[in-house]
Image: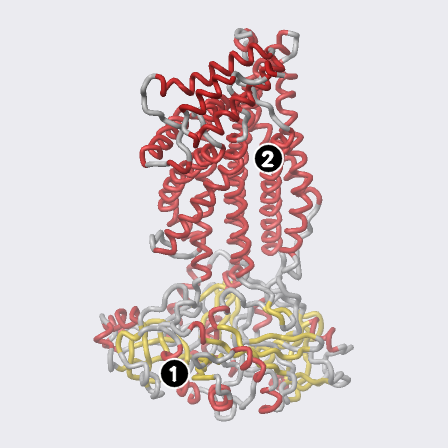
Amino acid sequence: MPEHRPPRWADYLLEKFVNPRFLEDIQGNLEEIFLRRVQEAGPTQARREYAWAAMRHLTPYFTKKSPRPYPTVSNLSPAMLHHYFTYAWRHFAKNRQFTFLNAVGLTTGLICTLLIYLWITDERTFDKFHDKDARLYQVMVHEKGGDRLVTSEGTGGILRVFLPRDMPEVEMAVCTTPPVWFQKFSLSLGGRARGGRTVSAAGNFVSSDYFKAFSFPLIQGNAQSVLTDKNTVVISERMASRLFGSPEKAMNQLVEWKWQAFSRQSQVTGVFRDQPRNSSEQSELLIPLSAWDDILPQGSMPNTATGPFHNYLVLRPGADAHLLEAKLAGYAKKHFNDPNATLFIRKYSDKYLYGTYENGVQSGGRIEYVKLFGAIAVFILLIACINFMNLSTAKASVRVKEVGVKKALGAGRLTLVFQFLGESILMSFVTLLIALGVVWLILPYFNTLTNKQLTLHFGGQFIAALAVILLLTGLLSGSYPALYLSRFNPALTLKGKLLHGMGELWVRKGLVVFQFAVSVIFIISVVVVYKQIDYVQAKNPGYEKDNIVYFEMEGRAATQTNAFLAGLKTVPGVVNASSIQQKIVLPAFMPSAGVRWDGKNEKDEIRFYKMPVNYGLTETLGIPMVAGRSFSKDFGSDSTAVILNETAIRQMGITDPIGKQIMVDGRKTRIVGVARDFHFNSLHEIIKPFIFKLSPQETMLATVKIQAGEVPATVARIQAFYASFNPGYAFDYDFLDRDYQIQYASEKLVAQLARYFAVLAILISCLGLFGLAAFTAERRRKEIGVRKVLGATTGSVVAMLSREFLVLVAVAIAIGCPLAWWLTRRWLDHFAYRATIGAGIFAGAGLVTIVITLATISFQSVRAALTNPTQSLKSE
């Protein structure tokens, strides 16, 4: 019908004067309003309002003013950008509570993200600095152990000669002794050292091509020749400065290095720059591998594919590593007649992060914690962004008229999306600057916590990461509010009406549920980790780890071990003393299959850890005997005796083992005792077969039990005794309890960091909930006033306002608990011995979450309930 159409003259004027670029949007908005007003107020009133709205658009043209169309993405200018930023700042300043909650949430999330980014970046750079990193590999070996494969770094030293000869892909090979073999070397200059004292140095034996393969720059010396003579050494820059004052003065000087009973005077032919902290191996003294041959008896190291050494390969440029690995698969069987060993190669820089193998398959390592903390950073930042989304959409009622006016003036949806995203990016930029300042302040504490030396270095990579974090945070946090606000109908928004769709409500509720589900997972995970650590601390390892000190015996102490130990036992405060080849905790050697006994199934390759010990070792460590006896000088036949643990006897299937004979490494021995099982490896692993072999001449570490409460004074007395018995050697000691704790250093770090991040995640979630509760109370202000006038009590109003949020949190708990159970079970599966996780942990986490929720929303709820209803209804 004609009367149901807008006035033609108004459309004519619009088409005549308005810029065509904006005409379609303006007419579309006016027509939409017109059709609604026809239904609401009738056609006459609708035509009148259409005409007035059209005239408002035509006013600039009738007054001879230049038209100023609403800015769009296509006609942006510096002036328009300035307008956007000015408006955004005014919006933030006007809505202080909204700005504060968003700023604190985003800043907290960005602080966590930046700290975790710095930590992950440092972890991923370990051993990556070598120039030949892409071509640098380590030779590894899988060995059959029963129905499983045991993976080891230990390979034969002869591979350094054979592999470059037999494999055209190999450019050079480097062989070293395992660094874990050596506690410390003693390094001295006699009277020429500062004060004539002896210093300790972390050292290793390496082959002559070491500096050609690894990028440890030489400050002094030639990489081609520094390690060619067995009577030479290369020292670090720090060690050169410590001994001689400077690297230049160290060149060609004579030093005496000592290890065990072996010592040698060598010439300093090179000084290398201190190895960076992101090197997995740290050395201050490097000795030619050829000198190692003078320490071991001739023929003690047979030419085999497996062995105690570490072999590294540098491949030729363009060589195919997969082809080389295929060739190595049968190398041990073909060249060494060893069908149980399979050689393979691993990229050297993967050693630090991917060091764990399970049944011959790479199964993680420190990379698991890198992934874990990466996920934590993502979730915490996501929670902070969700806060921004929820608070922005909750405050949409305040901005509804703003959107309507801008749309009526010709603003398209894309323009509004750009404006709202710009606001969120601006907020992200400001909070990022604040977060950087906070990170700079707390970084020293974080470094202490993680034992790192992280710094804020604004290089290209870090700046690019900041830009990515900024854009992702701004776009993610502002995307939903921008799309939500920009879709409002101008016909309703100009009248102050805002229709909340079910989709919008469900999205907001879903985001709240997601936030608190993550918080519940954090709470449960932290409790489980701490519970497992407490379990590890409380569990009896099977030996006495407290008040046990150990140190390496050198010089006279190594050659006269019995006299030295006898003297130690006379030191006041010493309860007992003995010696052992290596630390009882995490021994460095790999288990061997060289054990035979009557009735053994030759197809079974049971592997045994073997440890040479001295008399009194089990008594010193407090390892009890379940059968037989410990080693005793009263029995001369004990020189060929062994003690096995319970697991060894059980797997061997021997009944009445005392007095039985077995073959150990081709030597006939007799079982004189069975020791109770003890955890010489961490609780990540089940207890393995273990053999104590009486061999005092092979022991290297003095192990001393000290009377409780007398540790500092007794250690000082032991040091004085060592200096008098063994002059010229440094006394470096450590505690067995510390070694035990080191096994779980990663778990403790996870527990500490997870605790802090859990608190921050909960804080961020509560900030968002606090803001939502405030806006909910404001939106329902008049409803609350009506209810109070009709007799509602304060308690009922508080319950009404709290019920919605408590339901959402209950749903979050119902979702978070099963997910937390699954995640914590996966983590606990890494432990062969683990704490029991009961339902109480999950119930407690749920209760804590509900209490936190009530504490967060109660202030706003009570405040709204106590408001005078006359204030709420005075505008009605």
User: In the rendered image, which residue does mark 1 sit on?
Assistant: 209
Q: Nearer the viewer, residue 478 or 418?
A: 418
Mark 2 nearby-residue class (10 Å; few <14, some 14–19, many ≥20): many
Residue at 31% x, 33% y is 79
Check disc 2 and give the amino acid type.
Val
- Where residue 593 sits in the image (x, y, percent)? 65, 81
Q: Nearer the viewer, residue 44 or 356?
A: 44
Tell which residue pokes out farthest to the bottom in this image.
298
The image quarter containing residue 558 is bottom left
Placement of the N terminus among the 4 image quadrants: top right
- Where residue 688 sits in the image (x, y, percent)? 66, 71
Check disc 1 and give the amino acid type.
Asp
Q: State whether residue 642 appears in this view.
A: yes
Q: For the residues marked 2 and 1, what is the alpha-carbon distance in whole angstroms?
A: 60 Å
Q: Nearer the viewer, residue 72 or 465?
A: 72
User: In the rendered image, which residue does mark 2 sit on?
Assistant: 512
Disc nearer the start of the sequence (2/1) = 1
**Helix, strand or loop for disc 2:** helix
Compared to residue 189, the image places residue 501 above or below, namely: above
Image position of 668 (left or right of 353): right
Compared to residue 268, the image places residue 451 above or below, namely: above
Q: State whether residue 862 appears in this view.
A: no
